[in-house]
Image (cartoon, helix red, strand yellow):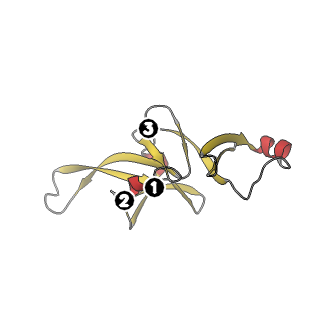
Amino acid sequence: MRDLIFRAYNPIVDRFQQFSLQDIEKKKDQIQWHILKIDQYTGLRDSKGRKIFENDIVEFSCERYYDSDPKVPTTKTFISQVKYIEAAFIISETQEDDTFLCAFNNECIIKGNIHRNKELLEK
């Protein structure tokens, strides 16, 4: 079983802190939980070996066959927010097309996160 690791973002001081479930029990009375934005570790790492958390923004490329020339694959690059939906970590190629993060984690690169770099998703 993997360790459940979380990252807390405090928007007031613009700072992240990692913690585990054991840390929560020890510090539960010392932390102002209502302020923090909590992200869960996916258990996966990007191509540079960095831990990927929920709400990270990742860049990934994939080959697809399109109707314009179904014999030649086209590589497209996407930027997506890592989301936790129905017990799975998901990234999106388009608004209609979700993909499991584990299919691309070794090929994706963390570009930022939703807390500090929301503008990356607007491109």
Q: Residues within 10 Å of mark 2 (few under 14, many from 20)?
A: few
Could you tell me how far apart the alpha carbons at marks 1 and 2 are, in whole angstroms?
Answer: 8 Å
Could you tell me how far apart the alpha carbons at marks 3 and 2 are, in whole angstroms?
Answer: 24 Å
Residue 2 visible at all: no
Q: Residue at x 42, y 54 (%)?
A: 80
Residue sticking out furthest to the top: 49
In the image, which disc is placed on residue 118? 1
Amino acid residing under circle 3: Asn
At which x and y percent is residue 16?
A: 62, 42
Amino acid residing under circle 2: Glu
Q: What secondary structure is marked by label 1?
A: helix
Q: What secondary structure is marked by label 3?
A: loop
Residue bearing the label numbered 2: 122
Q: Nearer the viewer, residue 107 or 53?
A: 53
Amino acid residing under circle 1: Lys
Residue bearing the label numbered 3: 106
Q: Residue at x 37, y 52 (%)?
A: 79
Q: What secondary structure is marked by label 2?
A: helix
Of tags 3 and 2, the one toward the viewer is 2
At which x and y percent is residue 123?
A: 32, 56
Q: Nearer the viewer, residue 76 or 12?
A: 12
Q: Is residue 36 left or right of residue 65?
A: right
In the rendered image, the quadrant that contains the N terminus is top right
Could you tell me how far apart the alpha carbons at marks 3 and 1 are, in whole angstroms?
Answer: 23 Å
